[in-house]
Image (cartoon, rainbow, N blue to C red):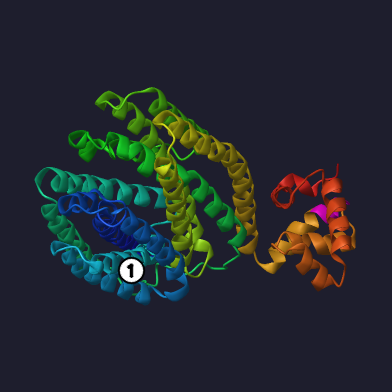
Amino acid sequence: MAGGENSRFSYIQLDERRLSIIVFSLFFAWLLAFPFEGQVLYALADRVQIDPHAMIFGAIASHVVGLFGCGFLIKTRQAAKRLMRFSMVFCIVGTGVFFFHPSVLWNIVLIASSLLASGCVAAWGFFLRSGTPPNQRIKTVADGLIFSNILMILLNMTAVHLSPYAGLGLSMFLIGGAMLFAARLPAAVPAVLPDRPKQPISIVKPLVFLCLFITVITINSGLMYQVINPAFAHLEWLTSWYWAIPYIVALYIMKNLPRKTNRTYILYVAIAMIGFSFIGFMILDHSAGSYLVVNTLMLGACGVYDLFWWSILGEMLDFDQNPAKVLGVGLSANVLGVLIGGLIGSAIVASDLPNYNSSVLALAVVCVTLTILPLLHRHLSALLTDHAYLTVVSEMSPAEQTSMVDRIVLAGRLTERENEIAALLVKGKTYRMIAGELHLSENTVKTHIKNIYSKCGIQSRTELINLMLEPESTGHK
């Protein structure tokens, strides 16, 4: 019976995983190719001879709002599925508006479509969580990003080399396909697939630092859109298909790395690649060969760090009742970084500085972000490790938690009061919460915690939990 249940579990996961990847890939391809700095929109604007930049910045700002707000409005799986289907219908109709002559309706529809489309992407978090186990989500995300970028290339080439209206029509076809497959996504989670974490714990602090990390690192993407891409706009035959190739290759390599691989080192390599990309842009000309060098470095790096933070977001989905909120907030940080970088890039381009000096200024911005990133990453890694240990403790019974703390007490290390504080500390309580529960001042609690760390020869709560989990901690020293 148990074996049959496990087989059923695997079948359901595989089926929903495939559906979720198809839905994400089809819809996200339209999002990348059209409203989000897409070549279809640029080609269409060029055909009717209008400047799309103000319209695009409005759409990107709308993306930020849609992603951030979705999880606070959509709180159930059923509501998520309804939003996805409604968004797709609206986006099909809204995209059709662009077959007509430019008007204020273009701006309204683009902003509304971007808002709903972003909510749709955030709502997909429900199906990412239930359809894929935590340790496999990096592969699901990688597959979705790879297939959506391949489809985006197809849309770009259609719009650039055939007609922007052909690209527009094909993008509508992709949304229609996404809508059909979304209808097959289960509205309710089968009993063998738990839709909620067993014991949710706060992820506010690691999520905030992850968002800060994402925002800083994607400022470079915004700069790329406004500073680098226009310099190679004359190479339409090359940019239309090669644009995302290094990104796809990087995703494929990252996806197939052994689980034991330390991705942190690869992240630092990617950060260096971004720096070299902007240096190459400064010293090279604007030929096809230069584009291959600059774009390969930049987009390869983007593929590495995108999958890096996407995978962290995927793992965080299990620690909140609402995965749409976690995914939406994280992705809003990504789009916010692009928006900030785009505004900086536009200001640089609009300045009266010579091209060389403009490139130096853009490189200076990149250097500042690359200097901040290692500090943010170290702090984020510490928070995630701390969170992982707290998760282990949260899944223990009260008796197991007490026994774990007693290992240190039995070794003669902690006093009774320190024992009480240690027990609350490993449960994730803050200094203020411990002080209130034990009727002590915060300064007294801090003093006790310093004594606990000193007696155990450690420096953090994570090390304390690790020490308590070690069997040898029961012995005397």
* Amino acid on which the number 1 mark rests in the picture: Leu
Q: Which residue is mark 1?
A: 116
Residue found at x 32% / y 53%: 53
Q: Secondary structure at mark 1?
A: helix
For the residue pair 10 and 374, the one nearer the viewer reads as 374
Look at the image and give the residue range highlighted in magenta.
408-413
Q: Is residue 432 left or right of residue 379?
A: right
Residue 352 location (% of width, % of height): 42, 38
Residue 446 location (% of width, % of height): 84, 57
The answer to if 411 sits in the magenta stretch is yes
- Tell me, yes or no, if residue 248 can be seen here: yes
For the residue pair 220 and 416, the one nearer the viewer reads as 220
Residue 51 location (% of width, % of height): 27, 53
Q: Is residue 173 left or right of residue 324?
A: left
- Tell me, yes or no, if residue 255 can be seen here: no
Count of numbered marks: 1
Quadrant of image for the N terminus = bottom left
Residue found at x 71% / y 67%: 399
Residue situated furthest front in the rendering: 352
Q: Residues within 10 Å of mark 1 (few under 14, many from 20)?
A: many
